[in-house]
Image (spheres, coloured by chain):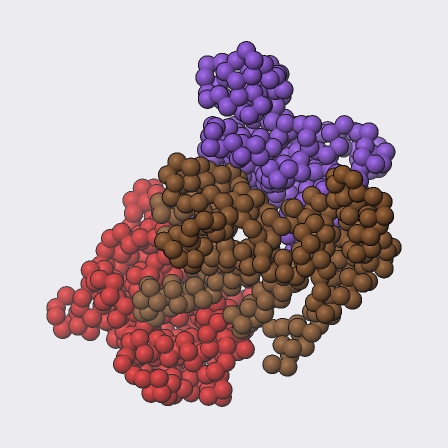
Amino acid sequence: MLIRRYDLKLKSPIKIRIFKENSFWDLAWKRFKRKKLGLIGLSLVLMITVMGIFAPLLALYDPNDQSALIYGPGSYAPPSLAHPLGTDRFGFDVYSRILYGARTALIVGILTAILSSIIGIMIGAIAGFLGGQTDEILMRFTEAFMLVPSFVVILFLVRIFNILSPKTFLGQIPLLNLWIIIFVLAVFDWPPIARVARSQFLKLKDQEFVEAARCLGASNWRIIFNHVLPNALPPIAVLSALEVGNAILSEAMISFLGFGDPHVISWGQMLTFAAQDMQVAPWVVIAPGVFIFLMILGSNLLAESLSDALNPRLKE
Amino acid sequence: MSETQSSEKLLKVENLVTYFYTSSGVVKAVDDITFDIKRGEVVGLVGESGSGKSVTCLSILRTVPRPGKIVGGKIIFKGSNLLEKSETEMQKIRGKEISMIFQNPAFSLNPICTIGEQLVEILRWHTGLNKEEAAERVIKLLKAVKLPDPERRFNQYPHELSGGMKQRVVIARALLCNPSLLLADEPTTNVDTTVQAQLLNLLNDLKRDFGMAILFVTHDMGIVAQLTNRVIVLYCGKVCEIADTETIFSEARHPYTKALISSVPRFDYKVSQRQKLKVIEGSIPDPISPPSGCRFHPRCSYADAVCKSKVPEPRELEPGHIVACHHAGEIKWSD
Amino acid sequence: MKPLLRYITRRILFFIPLFIGVTALTFFMVNAIGDPVEMMLAEVPGVSQRQIEMVKKFFGTDLPIALRYFKWLANLLHLDLGVSIYKGKPVLNLLSTYGAQTLKIQLASLAISLILSIFLGVTAAVNQNTKKDTAIMSLSLLCRSIPGFWLGLILILVFSNWLMFFPSYGALSSKEYLFGSRFLDELWHMVLPTLMLIFFDLPAFTLLMRSSMVDVLREDYILAARASGLGKKTVIWKHALKNAIAPVIAYASYTFGVMIASSPVTETVFTWPGVGFLFVDAITNLDYPIIMGVILILVVSVFIASLVADILYVIIDPRIKLE
């Protein structure tokens, strides 16, 4: 992988290859490939991504198509050739809804991970780099955030925003509930990333190459972005991978309790109705849950093996 | 070996092999070593890091941590082979007949128990003493290792003691049941030099009072000169040379031994004689795939084709002087 | 005793501003967006504006928000948490009845998870990298990945609907008690929800116990204890475990403090009349006395839990001192 870096004095691009032979990244990838679990995790996540992206192509029916009620086996139909995973109480095809649900899951998971990582890195970097009072205050703040049992507060905030936002200009935005959920989840999941970012920055800021860069006249921001960040990324990447799974689980739970976005198809929401219909149609409970499980498992495995690959630890 | 001669020998290690089965390969930590220790003797076990010194001690006690395993050989202590004993029988020997003291005093004491609790527990485990009797004996022993204010220290936690005091406690712990053999794994490496001198004197006195044999593992030739009667030199899991201390320093036959002795800085040279510090070229070999033939040959200035292909067997050059070198006795040292 | 009391007092002093901040924020947020009385009565036909005003006056929602908050704080001092707007009962009563139910399953799950995790974690650590260890680790990781609430549903599916071993909802049978005993009936209803909670807690505790134990077993003093002749069982269960257990106990204390966090989902799945269930109801209806009450418990219990965890650390490890 090539990146362009501008030398501070010369103002000309100096191309640097990151993935050199036997460079850190190369070795890390080799280690990653060795672990079968990591590949399984990666393939699970990729599979669900593909499902989500190509949902319109792979789906047999439109997810809101209730024609089964009239032309098909009706509601609560068991799995059959026409409906591989059966139909639910509204006559929707479960299989198609699962595919579209993958989109929601991925959007929530990935966006939350990205957002919480950005917030976490920023706060951790500032705390670690500036140190002193700023560090103290920021760390107390972070600890306080971590102690709070987030789920209860998340539910509360989602509900508040649900009621509040339609009244304001924000109500015009489509899928507003979903963005609210993503935002609230990210706001509560950044502390672990901030902590890791801070410790990485603390470790790295005293290293020699930072001193060297400073001597060349680089500003603080430049140092953070070009020098320290690439080295600090590995453990943060691990946490982000975990975060994807966490976010999807949280969103599923929020939707399950009825506070999700009614305009999108969510696996959690499918389970709300499925739970009530369990006596009549047990298969409706199984499918969404299995996919949530696979997604979380995938991201957990990915995180485990990323962590092993990037941090060679002696296991013996 | 006649019966009377072998009964003098407290410990006889014969062809001991201990390997570590790691995910990167098999580490041949101890690869066929043979030596013995007589009653009341102080034997130095010398070598670089990774030469197998600590593993030898752990093998004698059979507390080699996973993934290590004693693969072959015999360890004959007071006439019986330790490798054939059951775990229960070994527990009666560890801490009682054979004791060990470790390198880092800060870490070899349980941080959440008081000094008294730890030592009393071990004493009561091996003997049938009740709490008061055991406590008395522990305090007596703490006095013997010259720990200041032993009654107060008895109720303190390890972190409340200095490094030197901790190491004295560790020595006391090892001597609780009057062992016949003390395995000392570099006990003075991690303490200040002043404390080091005190501890060495202490060990000398204790040896006189308790009469135990000591296997003193170290890489410091100075300590060897001060303390030991005999020396075993290890390199990469194999024995290079075994001889009396005096002989080792005056008439070393193995190139590695000679190099070790020469690398000690000398303060008695006149200004005109002073030279650069002598180093041994090269670095420690990979214990997973050691060099062929004599393990020292890549770093030896006297090595030839034979050294590269054949593993030298230890030979007794003179009574009590064993060397494992193809050219032992033939080499004229260059300095 | 003295330094302990001073420490606790200092922690409480630091906590009070936090407490006021959080509760004030919550109060304002809930009340700023809508009047629960109006919401409630909007669905009731034929209610006149005057009647709405009367109800508002009764519940105090006609007063400005800031005043309402201070009234709430003042009432707090003599343990009056107000009256639920929807249920009409005093909040304190509601919290204690529902809270007791939540405590039942959470404490049972915590106790069982803790004990089991000690056995599993120690076994895994002692047999590190063998089949036993891999099995325990993989199972734990797997359980962590399974969405808890889905598992609850599956439990109901299998044990309630198909096998009909256990009841699928509620804390108590509405008609006949199991075998005529109320105690047994309550236990019987507790089984499935507790099982689901154990699924949440056990993997986390086990993995923590294992990693803490692995670190301790690597230490020199464990090797020294073995070299002194002590038996394997003594060394592991007495010396190693005592050193390794501190983080697990601290985490258990923390889990206890945040037990409210896992309750909404569990209690909705099993229709269990606990605080989580109450809370979900309350935020749907914007029943702010209950919301405030629950947030209050939340904040206080998290505080107490972290305080207890810190104190436990000091008790277990003589190296750590109160700051």
- Name which quarter of the figure residue A94 lies in: top right
Q: Colour of chain C?
A: brown
Residue closer to the observer: B178 or C272? C272
Residue A96 lies, in percent from the top left, at 57, 20
Q: The purple chain is which one?
A: A
Question: Who's the residue at 55% across and 59% down the image?
Answer: C100
> What quarter of the picture does the N terminus of chain A occupy?
top right
Instruction: Tell me, yes or no, if residue B259 can be seen here.
Output: no
| Residue C119 in the image: above or below residue C42 | below
Residue A205: x and y in percent read 72, 51
Which one is in front, C267 or B97? C267
Q: Viewer-proximal residue, A295 or B126?
A: A295
In the image, taking residue A123 as reference, residue B170 lies left or right, namely left
* Residue at the spot 26% in from the left edge and 59% down from the top edge: B34
Image quarter of residue C312:
bottom right
How far across and down, in percent of the image, does residue B286 sit? 42, 46
